[in-house]
Amino acid sequence: MSAPPGQARLDVAGPAAPPRSNGELVFAEPWESRAFGMAVALADAGLFGWDDFRDRLIGRIGAWEAEHGVDAPDFRYYACWLDALEDVLVDGAALTAGDVAARSAAFAERPAGHDHDHADHAH
Amino acid sequence: MSAAAERPSPALRTEAMEALLVERGLVDPAVMDRFITTYERDVGPLNGAKVVARAWTDPEYRERLLADGTPAIAELGFGGPQGEHIVVLEQTDDVHHVVVCTLCSCYPWPVLGLPPSWYKDPAYRARVVREPRTVLYEMGLDLPAGKRIEVWDSSAEVRYLVLPQRPAGTDGWDADALAGLVTRDAMVGVATVAAP
């Protein structure tokens, strides 16, 4: 039995609206959203053209597939995205090739709980 | 093996890259937050569903949409990155359209939001071109043997939006009610819109 049109009206504007309910989380992990937002903000600011980023993304995805095959289960799209973003930033001289690795290594040396060490943060 | 020999995690590298770019004045975290929030919360398949429902209920709009997608979509207020040139493909009794980006992940963000995992998956991107009927069957869409399948490969210039067929049993429904039936997968062409 189908409801009359008036009763079939759904809350299409709400967060649980049907077209979203067959979706999924947009980002699996927080860093993916930062990598996404960084690329879009940088392109929007004109630091690189989107097609230049896309070319680098195609290159990184293609390289992954050449190494692992298209049926490998552990494809990580945003890892390719992040590599492509670093590529296009190095191309444009916004970063040099070792910058991210060096800063990552420095961050890796931080003591555990580094982001909870504000002086006014009482425990 | 020592942990030091391993490549830093993508989370750490992302944090490092953002810190470097912020220090150099090249990116504003607040601008990043705005883009992230937009695509997490505001821009998604509901936009495309509204376009489809309007086309189902307004024949003149449907004509404009099929003739030139981008301006017709802009009439409903949707536009932005990855939506500069949207071509709308109409499903018919004879032809079924399905969309892929074989090289990466090009997708019409303003109407569908960001692509789902399966769209970016190497297996989908490789196989839907070679054996679309089998891939669609595996995704739950069993098309009649006589129906022609056309696979559209997104390019640097063009993004595609599929206009599904309106399901039976919806006579008299208004656009808001119809929009609630339209799924993302139907607008990529890996599903049809089921009758209510």
Image: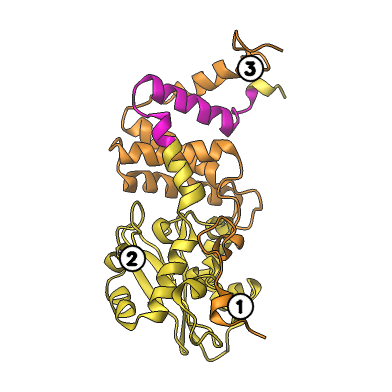
Measure the alpha-carbon separation of dots 3 and 1.
50 Å
Q: Quadrant of the N terminus of chain B?
A: top right
For label 3, the SS is helix
Q: Name the residue that disc number 1 marks.
A: B141
Residue B88: x, y in percent? Answer: 36, 72
Q: At label 2, which amino acid type do we have?
A: Ile
Mark 1, secondary structure of its residue: loop
Which residue in the structure is indicated by mark 3? Answer: A116
Residue A7, horizontal then vertical, whole percent: 58, 76
Verify whether residue B15 appears in magenta: yes
Is residue B113 within the magenta segment? Answer: no
Residue drawn where x is 38% and y is 26% of the image: A95
Residue B73 disc label = 2
Please name the predominant secondary structure of the magenta segment in the image.
helix
The amino acid type found where label 3 is placed reads His
Residue plotted at (60% across, 31% down): B9
Secondary structure state at the residue bearing disc 2: helix
Provide the chain ID for the residue under circle 1: B
* B187, A101: nearer the viewer: B187
Q: Which chain is yellow?
A: B
Q: Residues within 10 Å of mark 3 (few under 14, many from 20)?
A: few
Q: Position of residue B90 (x, y in %)?
A: 40, 79
Q: Farthest residue toward the bottom?
A: B146
Mark 2 or 1, closer to the camera: 2
* Chain depicted in orange: A
In the displayed structure, A118 sits above or below B42; it is above
